[in-house]
Image: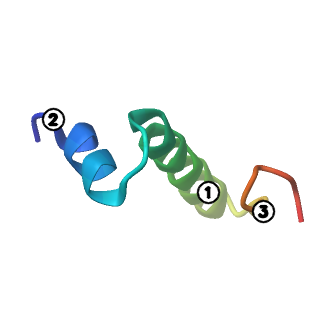
Amino acid sequence: MRHGVETVAAALGVSRFTVYNYLRHVNERRAAERAGERPVTEGRHGEER
């Protein structure tokens, strides 16, 4: 989808950077789950819980 990240960011009222960070986090979590690892749970500002 062309301009998808920009569209999502505008709809949510966040920056493109925030959308890309969220996508990276989701992809890393899925990869860890597929590998049988326990995914790291992070708090709202990136700190581990």
Secondary structure category for the residue under label 3: loop
Instruction: Determine whether 16 is above or below 45 in the image.
Output: above
Instruction: Determine whether 36 is above or below 20 in the image.
Output: below
> Which residue sits furthest right?
49
Residue beneath disc 1: 29
- Mark 3 neighbour class, 10 Å CA radius: few under 14, some 14 to 19, many 20 or more: few
Whole-angstrom CA distance, mark 2 to mark 3, is 29 Å
- Which one is in front in this view, the residue at disc 1 or the one at disc 3? 3
Position of residue 40 measured from the top left corner of the image (x, y, whole percent): 79, 59
Secondary structure category for the residue under label 1: helix
Residue beneath disc 3: 43
Q: Amino acid at mark 3?
A: Gly
Quadrant hosting residue 21: top right
Whole-angstrom CA distance, mark 1 to mark 3, is 14 Å
> Which residue sits furthest left?
2
Secondary structure category for the residue under label 2: loop
Residue beneath disc 2: 3
For the residue pair 30 and 22, the one nearer the viewer reads as: 22
Whole-angstrom CA distance, mark 2 to mark 1, is 25 Å
